Image (spheres, rainbow, N blue to C red):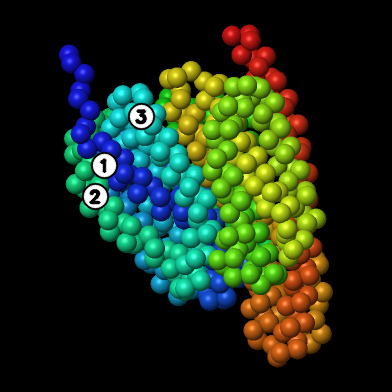
């Protein structure tokens, strides 16, 4: 039997799927610099702002694996095209949202579309490029687009907000989809091999329901206005859903997520690194965007430019991590990268962003590089701990860890900031108790309250808010630095256990 001839359209197919992938990646970071503008325009509360940002990665974390499985069942082309249409329509809906609730709903649809697009892109690349060298080049180009998309997200968002309204950060996706959908319709092969079997959507719903309930309970308990009993009941429901999900995975002959992989210390270390590093990257970037615009009165574009070092450095960390791991060993590289991230965070916490000089950009670049190396090291740890037959299951677990880390990072950073900010905001004379309570929730809420006050009182409240946010920013970065240093020690010992396990096999 002669080998199948390579598809003559394969490089055009690669171009089409990379264009499909780019908006999904951009949407993970482009919104960060738009938050202050969006908060004022929609009069969004702190809790609503957190949902607007992290409902996207949280839902993606729960839906990536089941959507990948569905694509295997009925074909990548069909799922990709449906996902692209949903993503385009949701982008238009988000752009013209008239309330925070409407925007949260649009972000839910964006996550649904994105979770259908991402697994199909990889699946189509693997099926289209049969030659291993060509496939390696194609996957390298795909990875570059992903890193570049995340890197230019804040800059693109800032540039759009310099000239247009906040909805433009979503509307930019629509013309891209108008090009990509017809291109994919024409170029992608209509005949595909599919995998028979049951599609376990119920398991995915358990995972999503559990994660969202736990996150809601955290926000309601610490930063929201819900009674403590409601928060505790919601938390209990979420934990019960997650426990049921875990039980089903352990008992299923074909689990959606192979949790037995957690028996490997290297995989435990890799997942912890993936969750924490991706969460820290998302949380720090969001915090910086708010500090620059709320406290230092930078424009969204200036905020995007300020954050270029962290994202560009993160984009080039992958190849460096591979080279360093091969030369010095994974254990040393993983631990050192996390310690370097801790040092960068701690130093940034005490620096003056109003007069950054050369040191702050260098520290931002060092942070982006070290977190990126940590993320790549997590991939090396996970993929190196399993045999080839379980590579797909391990990859699904890792991808879920990234998205979950991003969502949880934004949640915990946001809730932590709200608590610390409220404690450090100096009350302004003449505020009603309701206004004082709203102002203490976040810097965005402080601005919303100030809009209802007369000149001098408004100015005094904003000045107090800026001082409280600067203190909050310092406490947040120093606390995160301490946690990152602790994680470095934990990973060092976990990977030592992994090496012992490898030597016994």
- The part of the image, by quadrant, that contains residue 404 is top right
The residue identified by callout 1 is 12
Q: Residue at x 52, y 50 (%)?
A: 151
Helix, strand or loop under label 1 = helix
Q: Residue at x 66, y 17 (%)?
A: 499
User: Circle 3 sits on which residue?
Assistant: 135
Identify the element where label 3 is drawn: helix
Frontmost residue, 199 versus 131: 131
Q: Splitting the image into 4 quarters, where does residue 454 fall? A: bottom right
Decide: few, some or many residues near mark 2? Use Cα within 10 Å; few <14, some 14-19, many ≥20.
some
How far across and down, in percent of the image, does residue 480 sit?
73, 48
Left or right, 11 with respect to 481, comes to left
Residue 389 in sight from this viewpoint: yes
Report, in whole angstroms, how far the alpha carbon at label 2 lies from the one at label 3: 21 Å
Indicate which disc, 2 or 3, sits on the residue closer to the N terminus: 3
For the C terminus, the quadrant is: top right
How packed is label 3: few (under 14 Cα within 10 Å), some, or many (20 or more)?
some
Q: CA distance from mark 1 to mark 3?
A: 14 Å
**Residues tagged 1 and 2 counted as in contact (Cβ below 8 A):** yes
Label 1: few (<14), some (14–19) or many (≥20) C-alpha neighbours in 10 Å = some
């Amino acid at each position: 039997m002669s080998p199948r001839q390579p598809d003559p359209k394969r490089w055009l197919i690669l171009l089409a799927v990379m264009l499909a992938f780019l908006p999904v990646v951009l949407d993970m970071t482009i919104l960060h610099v738009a938050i202050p503008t969006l908060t004022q325009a929609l009069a969004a509360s702190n809790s609503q702002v957190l949902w607007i940002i992290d409902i996207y990665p949280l839902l993606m974390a729960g839906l990536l694996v089941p959507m990948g499985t569905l694509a295997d069942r009925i074909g990548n082309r069909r799922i990709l095209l449906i996902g692209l249409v949903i993503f385009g329509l949701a982008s238009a809906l988000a752009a013209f949202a008239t309330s925070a609730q409407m925007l949260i709903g649009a972000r839910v649809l964006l996550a649904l579309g994105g979770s259908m697009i991402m697994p199909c892109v990889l699946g189509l690349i693997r099926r289209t490029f049969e030659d291993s060298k060509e496939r390696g080049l194609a996957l390298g180009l795909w990875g570059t687009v992903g890193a570049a998309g995340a890197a230019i997200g804040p800059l693109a968002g800032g540039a759009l907000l310099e000239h247009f309204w906040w909805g433009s950060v979503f509307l930019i996706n629509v013309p891209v989809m108008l090009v990509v959908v017809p291109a994919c319709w024409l170029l992608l092969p209509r005949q595909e091999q599919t995998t028979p079997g049951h599609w376990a959507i119920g398991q995915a719903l358990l995972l999503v329901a559990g994660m969202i309930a736990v996150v809601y309970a955290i926000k309601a308990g610490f930063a929201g206005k819900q009674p403590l009993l409601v928060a505790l009941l919601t938390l209990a429901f979420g934990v019960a859903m997650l426990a049921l999900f875990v039980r089903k995975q352990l008992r299923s002959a074909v689990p959606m997520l192979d949790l037995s992989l957690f028996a490997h210390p290297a995989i435990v270390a890799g997942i912890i690194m993936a969750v924490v590093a991706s969460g820290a990257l998302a949380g720090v970037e969001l915090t910086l965007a708010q500090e620059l615009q709320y406290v230092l009165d930078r424009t969204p574009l200036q905020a995007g430019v300020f954050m270029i070092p962290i994202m560009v450095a993160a984009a080039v960390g992958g190849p460096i991590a591979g080279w360093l791991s091969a030369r010095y060993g994974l254990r040393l590289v993983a631990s050192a990268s996390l310690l370097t991230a801790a040092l960068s965070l701690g130093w940034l916490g005490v620096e003056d962003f109003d007069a950054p000089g050369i040191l702050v950009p260098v520290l931002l670049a060092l942070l982006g590089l070290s977190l990126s190396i940590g993320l790549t090291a997590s991939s090396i740890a996970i993929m190196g701990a399993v045999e080839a037959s379980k590579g797909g299951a391990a990859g699904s677990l890792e991808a879920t860890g990234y998205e979950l880390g991003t969502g949880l990072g934004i949640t915990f950073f946001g809730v932590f900031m709200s608590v610390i900010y409220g404690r450090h905001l100096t009350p302004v004379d003449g505020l009603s108790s309701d206004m004082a309570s709203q102002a203490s929730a976040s810097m965005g809420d402080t601005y919303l309250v100030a809009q209802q006050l007369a000149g001098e009182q408004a100015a005094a409240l904003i000045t107090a808010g800026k001082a409280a946010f600067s203190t909050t920013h310092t406490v947040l970065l120093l606390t995160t630095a301490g946690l990152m240093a602790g994680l470095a020690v934990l990973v060092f010992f976990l990977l030592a256990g992994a090496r012992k396990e490898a030597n016994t096999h």
